[in-house]
Image (cartoon, rainbow, N blue to C red):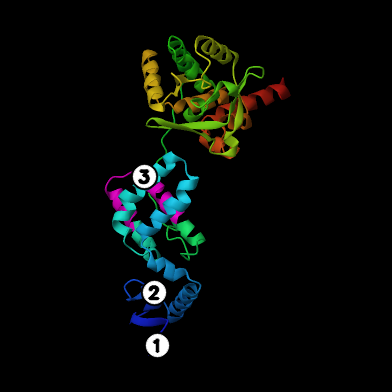
Amino acid sequence: MARKAGQLISRGPRTWLVRVSLGRDPETGTRRYHNKTIRGSFREAQSYLSAKLQERDIGRLPRAASIRLDQYLDQWLATAARPRLRPKSYTDYEPLLRLHIRPTLGTKPLGAVTQFDIQRIYAEMFGRGLSARTIEYTNAVLQSAFRQAVRWKMLPEDPCVGLDLPRVKRREMEALSVEECRRFLASAKESKWFALFALALITGMRPSEYLALKWSDIDRQRGAASVCRTIQVSGSCWNFYDTKRKRSRRIVKLQNFVLEVLDEVRGQRETEHDLIFHKDGQPLRQRKTKVEFRRLLAAAGIRSIRLYDLRHTAATLAVAAGVSVKVISDQLGHASISFTLERYSHVLPSIQDEAAAKVERMLMG
């Protein structure tokens, strides 16, 4: 007697067990089923059964049921993630999945992973004291894997959609005042790090951008630097990459004193290495740069801030000088002007006050 392809089994008032036959396992010969409890009317349960039968017929459910999440993640990392990710991003992905997702869901069939399963993992992570940022990043990695499964027709939908994540507390950025900038530059001028930190402070480049600068990127005639690559150092290996976004590729104007300092550096050091900032031909590491940055801050009697905050300082200095938001956004390589407005909204009112005063003087004399 032939078995039914799909069944609706009553489990109580407005509760139905939907069972879809997936055939026999090719290795063990045992029958496989997709089971789902539906709470609602008979019509809703019937609709779900019809949809699953259709998915089974086009080959989705059998593939999702025959592979464990562990196996799928291995395939996804090797064939989809690794070819498109930078090494650092790839090395971040793997431990997030290994530590937080695989221990609980790794042996579960890909098609059996539910929103509740994932939500429970995030609740447990939060309960262990892990940050909302870590949970958000873990979800981003897992969602990327499930979206690929949908594109590969292995899943009908992404189970990460609609999850409730803890709210990430954005770290408040800090910036040096004009007076603190003067003291910091005076302190840095007595060291071999003056050119690097002067350029970082004035241009607002990201550390991975100014540490990747080459002499060929400096246009002395135009007084500008071309930002076209980043650098990543891992262990004894380092690699150059294109900037992450198209808008990150940009031309940044350099002040005269920065150009003069760079000229001095080029005259004092061997020019056989194209990298501007290096030690014996090897790129400088961000960790070492951070140490020297904090040392110079302490020498100037300035509170400790992050190295990345030099980028925020450059932006706030430009705002204070009355530079247009469009120009600031282009200089920083932001994805959009709206991002710049949102990021620096706390310092923009001063520009609006000054603009209003200028208009009033024009009109009223």
Residue 38 circle label: 2
The residue pinned by badge 3 equals 134
Task: Evaluate if marks 2 and 3 touch, with contact meaning CB atoms under 8 Å apart.
Answer: no
The quadrant the C terminus occupies is top right
Q: Residue at x 39, y 19 (%)?
A: 292
The residue pinned by badge 1 equals 2
CA separation, marks 3 and 1?
Answer: 50 Å
Left/right placement of residue 96 relative to residue 316 reads left
* Residue 210 forms part of the magenta stretch: no
- Magenta stretch: helix, strand or loop mostly: helix
Q: Quadrant of residue 352?
A: top right
| Dot in front, 2 or 1 | 1
Going by the numbered disc 3, the residue's amino acid type is Thr
Task: Tell how many labels.
Answer: 3
| Dot in front, 2 or 3 | 3
Circle 3: is it few (<14), some (14-19), or many (20+) Cα within 10 Å?
Answer: some
- Residue 220: % across, % down: 63, 17
Magenta residues?
120-145
Going by the numbered disc 2, the residue's amino acid type is Ile
| Residue 204 in the image: above or below residue 195 | below
Going by the numbered disc 1, the residue's amino acid type is Ala
- Residue 27: % across, % down: 34, 71
| Dot in front, 3 or 1 | 1
Q: Secondary structure at mark 3?
A: helix
Closer to the camera, 42 or 66? 66
The quadrant the N terminus occupies is bottom left
Circle 1: is it few (<14), some (14-19), or many (20+) Cα within 10 Å?
Answer: few
CA separation, marks 2 and 1?
Answer: 25 Å
| Residue 360 in the image: above or below residue 147 | above
